[in-house]
Image: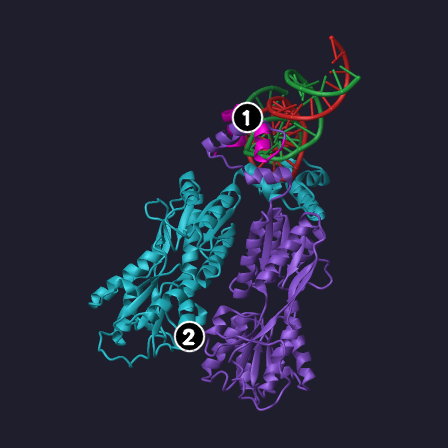
Chain colours: A purple, B cyan, C red, D green
Amino acid sequence: MAGIKDVAAEAGLSVATVSRVLNGHPSVSEDARRRVTAAVEALGYRPNAVARSLRTDQTRTLGLVISDVLNPYFTELARSVEEEARTLGYSVIIGNADERPDLQDHHVTTLLDRRIDGLLVSPTDDGSPGMLAAARAGTPMVFVDRWIPGVDVPVVRSDGRAAVRDLVAHLHGLGHRRLAIIAGPAATTTGRERVEAFREALGEYGLPLPDAYIGQGDFQAESGRRVTEGFLELAEPPEVVFAADNLMALGALDAIRARGLRVPDDIGLAAFDDIPWFVHTDPPVTAIAQPTRELGRAAVRALVDRIEGRPGSSVTLPARLVVRRSCGEPGSGHGIDRPPSPVRRSTP
Amino acid sequence: MAGIKDVAAEAGLSVATVSRVLNGHPSVSEDARRRVTAAVEALGYRPNAVARSLRTDQTRTLGLVISDVLNPYFTELARSVEEEARTLGYSVIIGNADERPDLQDHHVTTLLDRRIDGLLVSPTDDGSPGMLAAARAGTPMVFVDRWIPGVDVPVVRSDGRAAVRDLVAHLHGLGHRRLAIIAGPAATTTGRERVEAFREALGEYGLPLPDAYIGQGDFQAESGRRVTEGFLELAEPPEVVFAADNLMALGALDAIRARGLRVPDDIGLAAFDDIPWFVHTDPPVTAIAQPTRELGRAAVRALVDRIEGRPGSSVTLPARLVVRRSCGEPGSGHGIDRPPSPVRRSTP
DNA sequence: ATCCTCCGTGTAATCGATTCCACGAGGAGG
DNA sequence: CCTCCTCGTGGAATCGATTACACGGAGGAT
């Protein structure tokens, strides 16, 4: 493969001049510029990014470590991250942690070894050794979706509190009183927050959240199935199950169907994270939608700000409730309720 | 950040010896080995992969350019590729082409600039300039899922012919005669092949495939919606629509629902590529499942074989039909048919 | 005419590793 | 005791770029 020396030879100039042309340095004659361009063209030369990175100590690459690629929410996040990074002149290397701290650490260290310019992480837990080391090592870093308390890193996320309150209002209005949640791992912020928001909202209606109605999941489909089976075996099963992410909702659907029960007649279902398929499931699933694209964009901008020496600030965007039919038909409820103000109805 | 020189100083040895220890070179004394290990530990030293790559001319990195990350099929493929690569000691950089040749080229050249050791591609079209250049440039390469005819590169894919024949047998058995297809781009092998297989299978039953029943899609949901709307406006709409990928099936579902029609009563639906959500859609969708994980694994193995100087061969794995309810209830059909032999029924 | 500045260019150091080659010490074989 | 080989080690070249510094020539000011 042709190197910069070959180009210099072909153009009859020194490598320094060639490099200057390549980097748009002002002090190059028009003649030299033309000859270099011609030589580059003739040889099909492409600069070696590895060599360049070694010298300049920057790779123009961002690392993105996400919890689970198979989760459509994270896929969409990854896509918008790559898109925004590309417009800013950066590439993205994605690492999939599969909700496993050890895998997460593996990717973090691999990315650091490659000297990426900055790291975007949605941490799987409360701080694996590699993660904390990275944060301390001074690599520009931004947390997205989830974060680690006590670590001084900007956080870009969405706040589901209001939407969860809307959801509970919606459920209460439909007459449901026994509400259960499939929680995410307690070691994640989103895992804890969603349960907390749910408990608080329930409290506003004087409803309890007994331990039996809190199932411990891990954001994967299988755990949603397992927890839901547990709920269904209770002497007094919940009327509605709220899954803290879309994969666990899928698992819940599996479990409910395996029992031969019907949604929403026998049991209601709601999920955190909205995905296109929820419109076409049987029945369409009521969900809390995050502004995923905006999250990805904001995260990249915050990170690039840090990389390029600007402050880089945290961002919190609101999530919103999307009502569908999986918790019961509107109007079929018994109680009368205050109108759910910021709720939007989706018309497919 | 500590470099190899710092380690050498700390250990009281030369950089050469440190390097030898790091790379497991045999001719190093036990004493030196211990001192280096201690120094590495003390300084938290990690070798700079950029420098190493420059010198050794290998990055231990694979590039994977896929057509669309938002398509669950490709997500799963990407995941299995990364998994297999990791066990073989390679990292993977994913590029998402979004079915756009220009974006595909962008990623291919970026990856080549980074001097990845090998490239895995599922080409968006019949050969964008960058792709062909890469193939000629001598970078080890393997096509996965889709390929480009006439380019001498191993192909790892699945053959859906038999499964499509099973599907048509199933539909015919159910009494359906007017069968339409939402095709993928004619510039992709999978786009063409699935139509061809469908047409052939139809032929075996003496059924025609009129042009009006071939809708041109682009593997994205929106095109599925548009094409299906067209089908529904025909004087004689098809009885069943077969979408050549899962996203177009999603779009078809949208269009059907928007018209207020019901699946399968008013119109049947089947899809290429099976995904977990198809079990829970309304109704569950009959689909052709590819052995995605195995495809990813085989592709990586073929590529790594090429990289490490071994031959690296093409692989074709069979797809299989998964019958659900979206084309009609078994037994509700009118015609009597030969029993669909290799068809498996899925019990959710 | 002299001096200074600016511009375009080239030479060489540098980034952080790997690896060829040389060298000295120590052991084996004659 | 001398020679030869092996082993462990260090010095220095190298990978392909960027960039500080030096230098020569042109042009303007005095």
Q: Chain of mark 2?
A: B
Q: What is the secondary structure assignment of the residue under circle 1?
A: helix
Most foreground residue, B51 or A244: A244
- Co-location on one chain, circles 1 and 2: no
Q: Quadrant of residue A146?
A: bottom right
- In the rendered image, which residue does mark 2 sit on? B257
| Residue A323 left/right relative to A139 | left
Q: Is residue A5 magenta?
A: yes
Residue B73 part of the magenta-drawn span: no
Q: Residues within 10 Å of mark 1 (few under 14, many from 20)?
A: few
Tell me the amino acid under the disc marked 1. Answer: Asp
* Residue pictured at 63% horizontal, 32% vertical: A26
Q: Position of residue A210 (x, y in %)?
A: 65, 84
**Circles 1 and 2 in contact, beta carbons < 8 Å:** no
- Residue drawn at x 41%, y 54% is B298
Asked whether B279 or A40 is in front, the reply is A40
Magenta residues span A1-26
Residue B174 percent across, percent down from the top left: 27, 76
Camera-side residue of C15 and D22:
D22
Q: Quadrant of residue A288?
A: bottom right
Q: Residue type at mark 2?
A: Arg
Can you say whether B223 is above or below B112 in the image? Answer: below
Vertical side of B297 occupied by B111: above or below = above
* Residue A108 shown left or right of residue A79 in the figure: right
Q: Is residue B151 left or right of residue D23?
A: left
Task: Give the chain of mark 1.
Answer: A
Q: Which mark is residue B194?
A: none
Q: Which residue is mark 1?
A: A31
Dot 2 falls on a residue whose secondary structure is helix
The location of residue A67, given as percent across then percent down, is 58, 62
Residue B340 visible, this angle: no
